[in-house]
Amino acid sequence: MSEMIPNEGFPKSAKNEPCCVNVEAGKTYAWCTCGLSGKQPFCDGQHKKIEGAPFASLKVTFEEAKEVWLCQCKQTKNPPFCDGNHRNF
């Protein structure tokens, strides 16, 4: 079993800017909520290493193909979409 990460200072900001993603219709995406993923803005399961397991990916399916701006600072009030909160840092 891998070593657990103390549950302090989460979520971590991956970047203080949004990420533009062209999503596919009907496809489900797993957005990272903890900020540890190496596949930002998407989840790679790193949240499972945080003590107490307080985080999980946020799964979202889009009805149509389109361009979306996903949050990477993890402080959005409209997850997984960027709401500009990264400007407050």
Image: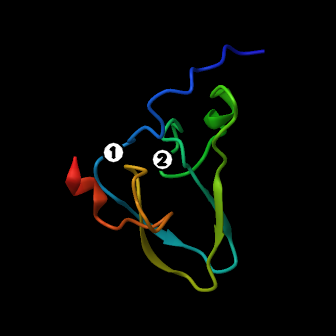
Q: In which quarter of the image is the N terminus?
A: top right
Q: Which residue is drawn at 63% across and 41% down?
A: 44
- Residue ID for mark 1: 15
Relative to 70, say whether 10 is above or below.
above
Using the image as rendered, state which of residue 43 and residue 25 is in the foreground: 43
Q: Which residue is drawn at 62% across and 28% down?
A: 50
**Disc 2 element:** loop
Q: Residue at x 28, y 64 (%)?
A: 84
- Circle 1: residue type: Lys
Residue 57: x %, y % from top left:
64, 51
Res. 27 image quadrant:
bottom right
**Residue extending furthest right?**
1
On the image, numbered disc 2 is attached to which residue? 40
Label 1 vs label 2: CA separation? 9 Å
- Mark 2 surroundings: few (<14), some (14-19) or many (≥20) residues within 10 A: some
> Contact, CB < 8 Å: mark 1 with mark 2?
yes
At a point 63% along the width and 43% down the height, the residue shown is: 55
Horizontal relation, residue 34 to residue 47: left or right: left
- The three-letter amino acid code for the residue at tag 2 is Gln
Q: Where is residue 45 in the image (x, y as percent from the top left)?
A: 66, 38
In the picture, measured across the screen, residue 41 lies left or right of residue 64, that is: left
* Left or right: 29 as drawn, with respect to 80: right
Q: How many labels does the image show?
A: 2
Callout 1: SS:
loop
- The image's colour scheme reads rainbow
Above or below, 17 against 64 in this view is above
